[in-house]
Image (cartoon, coloured by chain):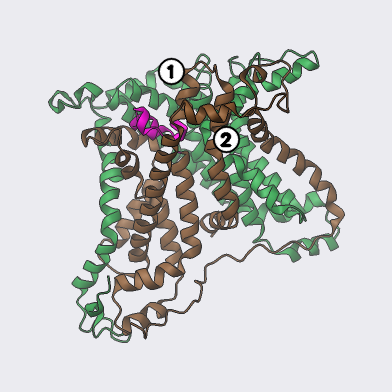
Amino acid sequence: MSTLSPGRTMPTEVPAPGRKPRRQPSTWWIYIPLIIGLLLLVGPFIWMLLGSFKTTGELRQVPPTWWPENPTLANYEDLFSRLNFLGYFFNSTVVAVAVTVGNVVFCSMLGYALAKLSFPGKRVLFGVVLGTLMVPAVVTFMPLFVLVANLGLVNTHAGLILPFLAGAFGVFLMRQFIGGIPDELLDAARVDGAGEHYIFWRIVMPLCGPAIATLTILTFLASWNSFLWPLVVATSDRMYTLPVAIALFATGQQETNVALLMAGSVVVILPVLIVFIALQRHFTQGIAMTGIK
Amino acid sequence: MTGRSDAVGAGPSAPTAGRSRWRDSLIAWSFAAPFVILFFVFMAGPILVAFVSSFTDLRVTDIRNPLAIEFTGLTNYLDVLSDARFQKAAANTAVFVVVGVPLTIVLGLAVAVGLNQGVVKARTLFRVGYYLPVVTSIVAIAVVWRLLLGTDTGFINGTLTIFGIEGPGWLSDERYALWSVIAMAAWRNLGFLMVIFLAGLQTIPKDLYEAAEVDGAGPWQRFKGITLPLLRPTMLFAAVITGIGYVQFFEEVYVMTQGGPLNSTLSLALYAYSQFSFGNYGYTAAVAFVLFVAIAAVTFFQFRVLRES
């Protein structure tokens, strides 16, 4: 095994990082509309954050306040003491992590088979998987629910995870990326006597960093934010994910406690925001990688 | 994991010698199997079931008693097409597509071109800021927007009262609700298109602009003569993705208005979902496939319009 020399060369399809435009600052005025637009997009979030420190009375005040008059942490205390918020947080995390790991592993495996191995039915399989990208979610919703109900998976983590473990998008992404890894590298390992599974786990996967990062972020976000399926499958308080808990709280209580709702929304957004800012370079690169060819 | 013996005697110079093709495809399928099994159980299978049940009278009560299900031919499809609520939903969805797609694309393109125009300072701040709504849970977004757009105590109308203006019922008045929801959807999705267009803009060679500038072309002429034509493939991708999204428009209306007031924001996908929650499973499947046809039609149309010059 020690004779294997995978090398650390990157696949050739990594998009070049955007070159900074070499424009003169004569276009400084472009900042004005961009900043106004930025305020319109980010403003609601700032208002939400500030609102989470207000009382419900202050939130219903006319005219509205921007800064909290009497900042309070009571909403956050309520969130974790009165509601089972840690439990919802746990459910969201378990589901999102399992779905993400499953997609990265299964999509990469199939992606490798499609890109680098030959087997009967390969073309048809790829066509069928890609074709489902066009099918709207409402089509599978009803049969999927009947299936999950008959398997006794309503109100289980498995019911929330299993239907999303194998996403067509991930296969497409991984196949494209793995296709860019030079064949010589794999053939060299084969000459040295490495099996396909060894090659996949020890050579191909370590080279797929950028694609895996993209798939991880996209899948994690989609799962963390997913709402409709958990709303239907998680019907008991102990299985609620964060979005479900907030949605039910928002509609069930006639919006009596909007301040609590604001604090809950901040808790939903915060982990996503941190992950996104930390990995935003991968994120934008990844979207560019899948969107532009 | 480390099957050393897998490839004994198989050099790159003699790919077939000593190595059975049978064994090769077995190994390949061992990679494909986990995904394929999950995929058929939870994706392809359900699609087939949905298709078949769209020709039956399947209801939630029949699930435990499959013998009660009867084939009804095209009855579901005919019922769907003649239902007044469906027609209302189809008309609304058409507005979502016809107004929402161009609006979101124009906004996303404007931001991308703006950022590409020599914005060096705080690039990351702009990108993260504009992208923030895309990565945020729709439930959290709905909480804020409902409070912003509330009729009596909402932030916008509350602010308007300072100037003595009485704001309309943005979400409660059937004349405004549809447009409020479209505005919110454009707000939420323009960041995604911004990223797509930024990537597309980087593929355009800079010297083209410099040459045009030497020839005396103004900013608008450069945009029309260089940016737009060279951005055509990106534009097609953006239009198709956004179009599919708006045909399937669901989350925004579900959390903001539940289709109301008076069905003024009811979308096709929300209509399908409401039939599902009534337990009309066969009927739901028929609506879903009508939606599928609509998506295919919109995509086909965009390919025809945008691919040719």
Which image quarter holds the N terminus of chain B?
A: bottom left
**Position of A156 relative to A209 (above/below):** above
**Residue A158 part of the magenta-drawn span:** no
Left or right: A231 as drawn, with respect to B260:
left
- Magenta-span inclusion, residue A240: yes
Q: Check the image and name the residue furthest to the left.
A: B67
Q: Residue at x 24, y 75 (%)?
A: B3
Q: Provide residue A70's location: percent of width, then percent of height.
A: 70, 24
Magenta part of the protein: which range?
A: A226-244
Q: Amino acid at mark 2?
A: Val
Can you see residue B174? yes
Instruction: State which chain is coloured brown.
Output: A
Question: What residue is drawn where x is 65% and y is 43%?
Answer: B130
What secondary structure characterizes most of the magenta part? Answer: helix
Q: Amino acid at mark 1?
A: Arg
Residue under pointer 2:
A266
Residue in the foreground of this view, choosing between A121 and A6: A6
Q: Which residue is mark 1?
A: B85
Q: Nearer the viewer, mark 2 or mark 1?
A: 2
Instruction: Kindly tell me whether residue B224 is visible in this rendering.
Output: no
Q: Hue of chain B? A: green
The residue under the point 65% across, 20% down is A59
